[in-house]
Amino acid sequence: MSAEKNIKSLNTTKYFLKNIGVLRFVPFVVFNILTPVLILISFFNSTDYLTNALMITQYICPLFSVWLSVFILREFLEAEGREIFYCTKRMNLLYETAKLFALSLLNVLLICVFCSIPEKYFLIESVRIIIVCIFYFSLTYFLSMLCKSTSITIFSIILFTLINVIFKSDIIKFPLFMSTTLITYKDIFTLCLPFLIISILFISLGRFFEKQITSFE
């Protein structure tokens, strides 16, 4: 009973971040230092600021938006002593990972606003980047719950990113999201909406598989 009470009062977000160690600082350094510096360098030293800003945000934001989520999932699914989080049947892993993902998403939005200062139309890019980040989160959560391991998850999101980098062009084609041009209002329906629908599906399936976790072989 005492152990159960202690689990209920545990600040899980603080606990998970502490367990991640120094790696917990990586996305904050990337979003708040590295990315703004790269954007500023691009603005002052390039005649094609818009394309460079697109590449920077598309390469960095989706991948690092799920950094903390991956490591929290790893702590929950693979770390020693993880069974304790099921003692009270209180833990909602989707909620726990979504909290820190939301913080990363806020950083991404601020980056998009920062990029929009010299190019106002860049604001529309926030729609694409935010929805793609949500897709990355849903894919991360779904695969982790399905496989009960983050190794396949990490491989999958890196592979998806590499495929986008290799096949990016000036024409936006779903299910790829990277392009060398800004999206249009039409692309919100032909590109962003499908990603959002798939994200909802992945999160729903992931939640279903999470509820099936009862043991850790």
Image (spheres, rainbow, N blue to C red):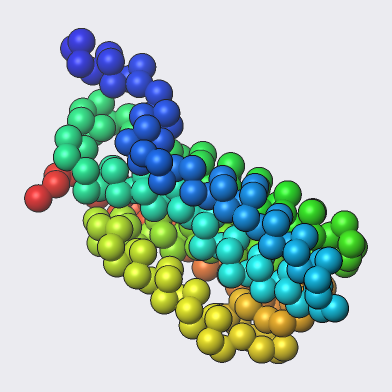
Q: Is residue 211 above or below residue 187?
A: above
The picture places residue 81, in percent across and down from the top left corner, at 17, 35
- Taking depth in this image into account, of 61 and 30 the one nearest to the observer is 30
Q: Residue at x 20, y 10 (%)?
A: 2
State the residue in front, 190 or 164: 164
Which one is nearer the viewer's eye here, 16 or 130?
A: 16
Nearest the eye: 114 or 194: 114
| Residue placed furthest toward the top | 2
Residue 84 percent across, percent down from the top left: 20, 30
Which residue is pictured at 30% across the width and 49% down the height?
74
For residue 133, say whether it is visible.
yes
State left or right for residue 29 relative to residue 78: right
Q: Is 3 displayed left or right of 38 in the figure? A: left
Q: From the viewer's perspective, is residue 29 above or below residue 61?
A: above
Instruction: Give the farthest residue toward the left.
Output: 217
Within the image, what quadrant is residue 95 found in? top left
Whether residue 205 is visible to the viewer of this picture, yes or no, is no
Looking at the image, residue 96 lies above or below residue 45: above
